[in-house]
Image: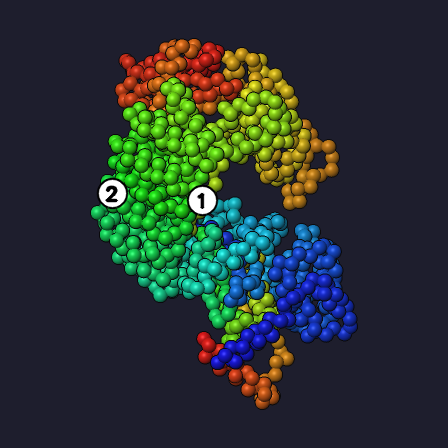
Amino acid sequence: MSSFRRDKKEEEDGGANMFQNLDKTTLLQEARYFNSTPVNPKKCIHILTKIIYLLNQGEKLTTQEATDIFFATTKLFQSKDVMLRRLVYLSIKELSSLAQDVIIVTSSLTKDMTGKEDLYRAAAIRALCSITDSTMLQAIERYMKQAIVDKNPAVSSAALVSALHLSATVPDLVRRWVNEAQEAIMSDNMMVSYHALAVVAGARRNDRLSTVKLVTKLSRAPIRSPYALCLLIRHAAKLAEEDPSEASEPYLEFIESCLRHKSEIVVYEAAHAVVNLRKSARDLAQAVSVLQIFCGSSKATLRLAGARTLAKLTTKHPSAVSACTVDLENLISDPNRSVATLAVTTLLATGAESSIDRLMKQISGFMSEISDEFKIVVVSAIRRLCAKYPRKHQSLAAFLAGMLRDEGGVQYKTAIADAIISLVEENPDAKETGLAHLCEFIEDCEHTSLAVRILHVLGREGPKARQPSRYIRYIYNRVILESGPVRAAAVSAVARFGAARAELLPNIRVLLARCQLDDDDEVRDRAIYYSAILDSDDQELINDYITNVPIPNMVLLEKALQSHLNTNPEDVFNIDSVPTAEETKEPEEAPVQIEPRKQPVVSLEERYFDQLKIIPGIEKFGPTFKTCEAVDLTESETEYRVRCVKHIFARHLVLQFECLNTLSDQLLEKVHIRLETVPGYIFLGEVACEQLPYDKQGNIFCILEFPKNPLDTLGNFGAVLEFVVRDCDPTTGLPDPGEGYADTYPLEEIEIGCSDQFRTRAASDDWEVSWDRAVSAPEACDTFGLSQNSVGEAAIAVCEHLGLPKSAISGDAVKEIRGGGLWREGAPVLIRARLVAAQGAVTMQLAARSPREDIATLLLAAVG
Amino acid sequence: MEGSLFEPTLYIVKGMCILDNDGNRILAKYYDKDILPTTKEQKAFEKNLFNKTHRANAEIIMLEGLTCVYKSNVDLFFYVMGSSHENELILQSVLNALYESVSILLRRNVEKRVLMENLDAVMLAFDEICDGGVILDSDPTSIVGRTALRTEDVPLGEQTVAQVLQSAKEQLKWSLLK
């Protein structure tokens, strides 16, 4: 047996040998052999195969090399060998994007596509269409039309598919072939009718009425091809979705009739469409039962298709899915892990409160068998379940804690810890148990980053618990046992307990004193720093430097520090100028998914940072204080679309205009904005957009300096877009000769309000304290009558006006809005508003306190 | 739930590839410029795909936003990739077409050595199944018919005794190994 194995090994090597150690330079040499006459087909096939193989392996050719090979290949048209010719076509397609002057083979290919050899014709058409441009196409148009209706299905398909590819670049030309394509839909060959349908439907894409006609006509015709039927179902479904009225009933009937087709592909396509279109559970029954059958299939693909579509239904019709619970439960043990995970998450999403315990028991067996990434999906499903059924937190938290104890990678453990942390934050009942689980976990946690995070959470949530002292033991154990970073985090956490709980302060002082003997610099520094602050007994100091430390946005902080070092390193860096890290809102996820994926959350400021770099002298303005959401300055469906983004700096304002030209036959040049500034603003300059081609976004920047007096900053800017229009060819985008003419386009006004200039936040726990402390600061106070009828609406309107989040509102009959903020030049401000409804009108008393009186007045002026 | 219907497009196949039993690429084609545009990304994806699939014979996997259906034989792995928002069964039918036509071309000896010897024909089969992401044909016999089969192959009667024995030996070997 051993000799046999060796035998096999050698054979393998032998077979692969000719393609191993292929070298580009030798191959380029070998390609010269193509020039010799007469052509030796066998040898040339071999060389050509090697070239294509090498390209397929990702070898890069320079334009010159590619062109050389390409021209050598053209010599092979002399040979009549079928295989060789076909490989020549293949290499033409591969090289067409790399080499120059590829159109040289047009005549040879045209000859082949009109020749007698069927094996050449189809492939020649496809090769030809991949190298021609719109001008050459007109010459072969006649042949293409003939080829579409050719009786050889391969030729017809090749012509239709090529037409489909071409319609992306020259739609008008392809539209002229629709009559031929329409004829081909009725072909006996399945693929031809599929491709023909796509060409016809593609040409009518923007014409709803003729699409309706096409679908209506074909839904009665006996189409045999499953693929073509799928395509027809998709078009019918789209029509039905666009028009939810009674008129779409025939489409739905057609789709439902396809549920009884004999091909599984069509049945699934129809079921999927029905599930997405039908609104009532009764109408869904048929499709759901088909999917149920799929779930019991022997083929994994069918089971996945079934389970996946059922999973999608969970958000809309949980009741329809719960009918399939038994089928889904059978899938928990499916050998395909994607199917099993889908089944579990679907069951978790649809499960009733009563069935959770049973389900958890079933899952726990399954969890040990699947890979980490599937586990993460299950964990996030459980996390959603925690939010849905808060009363079940006991068993869910226990389950999560059990998973924490199992083996797993850092990502998996992080997912579980996240789930428990969100449980602790959202559900007050679960706080104590959740924290206890986390404490237990850090006793034996090998991941530094995770331990640090949990210590931070303990420091934040622990002091609010009934018995904070028990957490201190866990945290202090870390100081004794763990590595430097964890010890440092533990010190910070301990200090927070001392700051929040006066009765624990003496003990905390002792602990911190011990930490001052640590070998790690960071740990010692922190211990000394916190001891000093705690010893000061100054509540304000403790609050600002231990309890409520603002965390700046790390990416922007780094960039701000860099530009600070480059421009004026002598000055003191003001950390308040960097936007604080926002509460990252997690993007709304589908309730059931198979693949765990994280979208990176990027703040507005980070997104625009690179775009702003093109403004000369921007670094002198300091870091961006705030970037506002883009505002539309035009209607959504106009010729030119313009959106304005306001970038606020400490003393400057940059207006970024994002322009989009939606006319394919126009090229705009010298595009700029004529701004009517509010008095007091100083216009510093503009970065215009030199060229604005069709469908490409262009940016124009206007740079202004804010007036010295904050009260002058409020107002509206008038804006007009000015540009030179040049007509151009819609397909190529090249402008017609000539000068073009100047034109203008009015835009809506740009409002600079008060909220733009503040970074605001809702009141934190210690708002009361800060408000009282600011009693000596200048205060502006006034009473307003508001136009809204209800207090709630009025409160929301005020919040929007001031740029405060809705969470700032509290109270029922008397709404109180509390918040704070930072003005662009760095002055903090506190806001309090009380709203009362009296005799059908709402009255508001608004007070603002700030060290700068004009800022406080500004806030009031903005409301008035 | 808007946008959850399948898009009425013909550009269904995002990629096809054949890997060997070490996860190295034998042939691969990607059809969407926005998905895996560079060779480096493609190879990384193939490695990842191979690691996730070579042990579990589970037909289908969702990976990096793509639905991948696969099938393996002896030392070859066949994959067809499509958007995660696509009819899986259509992808499955493309995979069947790929596997079956390669199998016919290799005279049922679906293994790396034979495939390398017939690489030219397999390349043509690739080209006949899918053109720029559009399914060109899914019927294995017609695909094989369209790939110009080599004609110089000697019929059984004219082969030497040694040749016949050699091919018989091979057939037997692999039927035992399967």
Q: Mark 1 and 2 residues: CB-CB less than 8 Å, in contact?
A: no
**Taking the image as drawn, is residue A223 in sight?**
no
Question: Reading the chain from its start, which is encountered first: label 1 or label 2?
Answer: 2
Q: How far is disc 1 from disc 2 in space, using C-alphas?
A: 28 Å
Quadrant of the image containing the C terminus of chain A:
top left
Would you place residue A414 above or below residue A342 in this image? above
| Residue at which label 2 appears | A394
Which residue is depicted at the point 67% across and 39% down?
Answer: A728
Q: Position of residue A736 (x, y in %)?
A: 71, 39
Q: Nearer the viewer, residue A61 or A737?
A: A61
- SS assignment at label 1: loop
Which residue is depicted at the point 40% across and 10% down?
Answer: A776
As drawn, the residue found furthest toward the left would be A354
Q: Position of residue A119 (x, y in %)?
A: 62, 70
Would you say A442 lies left or right of A554 here?
Answer: left
Classify residue A775 by image quadrant.
top left
**Pointer 2 local density, CA inside 10 Å: few below 14, some 14–19, many at least 20:** some
Q: Position of residue A726 (x, y in %)?
A: 68, 34
Q: Amino acid at mark 1?
A: Lys
Q: Nearer the viewer, residue A729 or A365?
A: A365
Q: Amino acid at mark 2?
A: Gln
**Taking the image as drawn, is residue A408 in sight?**
yes
Would you say A386 lies left or right of A232 here?
Answer: left
- SS assignment at label 2: helix
| Residue at which label 1 appears | A598
